[in-house]
Image (spheres, rainbow, N blue to C red):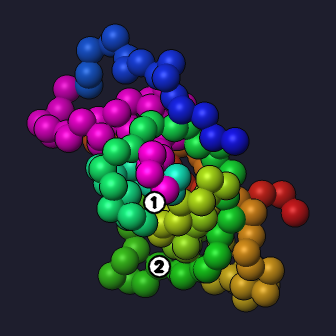
């Protein structure tokens, strides 16, 4: 059962210096990552979970949502290797081999994400095993922010 995150409090530490002005939902999401938490939004009308969080429910359109903490457990439902135009050199430097794919969290949110540890060589074998269990990992990214990638669970 999902529980709301009533005890989440933004950091009292001064924010990192940045020229970026973040919307409140984005700011809260990144503050959660700084504390090692994956935060999403749960619709109070239909119960759908949005991750990454957005202002309104993509299932029913309701804007009455609440913060929840996600478990980090998910499944990868597809595997797409980065093409030259979608490749991110900073990802390869920081994470090594990676792929894009449709990720579905344990809580039901579905989105396109990055999964590390997948190469052109391992992709065919992994495709036959889809959906694959994965787990979230919070990493540092350029610009002083954290981001979420996924890793394959040990099989």
User: Relative to the observer, which residue lies in front, 96 or 12?
Assistant: 12
Residue 12 vertical placement versus 93 (above, below): above
Would you say the residues marked 1 and 2 are in contact, meaning their CB atoms lie under 8 Å apart?
A: yes
Name the residue tied to disc 2.
82
**Which residue does the image show at 20% across and 39% down from the upper left?**
22
Q: Position of residue 87 (x, y in %)?
A: 40, 74
State how many labels appear: 2
As drawn, is 16 to the left or to the right of 35?
left
**Is 103 contained in the magenta span?**
no
- Residue extending furthest toward the right: 155
User: Relative to the observer, which residue lies in front, 7 or 14?
Assistant: 7
Residue 29 vertical placement versus 76 (above, below): above
- Residue extending furthest toward the front: 45
Question: Is label 1 in a helix, a strand or a loop?
Answer: helix
Which numbered tag is attached to residue 44? none
**Which residue does the image show at 67% across and 55% down from the upper left?**
106
**Is 42 contained in the magenta span?**
yes
Between discs 1 and 2, the one toward the N terminus: 2
Question: Is label 2 in a helix, a strand or a loop?
Answer: loop
As drawn, is 109 to the left or to the right of 76?
left
Q: Quadrant of residue 130?
A: bottom right
Query: What's drawn in magenta, residue-wise?
Result: 17-46
Q: Position of residue 49 (x, y in %)?
A: 50, 53
Badge 1: residue crowd in 10 Å (few <14, some 14–19, many ≥20):
some
**Which residue does the image show at 60% across and 64% down from the upper left?**
104
**Alpha carbon distance from label 1 to label 2:** 11 Å
Q: Position of residue 123 (x, y in %)?
A: 69, 82
| Residue 100 appears in view | yes
Name the residue tied to disc 1.
91
**Which residue does the image show at 47% across and 79% down from the upper left?**
82
């Amino acid at each position: 059962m999902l529980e709301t995150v009533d005890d989440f409090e933004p950091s009292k530490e001064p924010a990192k210096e940045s020229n970026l002005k973040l919307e409140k939902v984005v700011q809260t999401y990144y503050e959660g990552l700084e504390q090692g938490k994956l935060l999403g939004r749960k619709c109070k009308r239909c119960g759908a979970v949005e991750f990454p969080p957005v202002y309104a429910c993509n299932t029913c359109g309701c804007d009455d949502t609440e913060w929840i903490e996600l478990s980090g457990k998910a499944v990868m439902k597809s595997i797409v290797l980065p093409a030259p135009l979608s490749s991110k050199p900073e990802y390869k430097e920081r994470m090594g081999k990676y792929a894009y794919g449709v990720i579905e969290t344990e809580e039901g949110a579905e989105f396109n994400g990055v999964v590390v540890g997948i190469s052109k060589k391992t992709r065919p074998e992994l495709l036959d095993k889809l959906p694959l269990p994965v787990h979230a990992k919070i990493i540092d990214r350029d610009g002083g922010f954290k981001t979420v990638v996924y890793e394959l669970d040990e099989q």
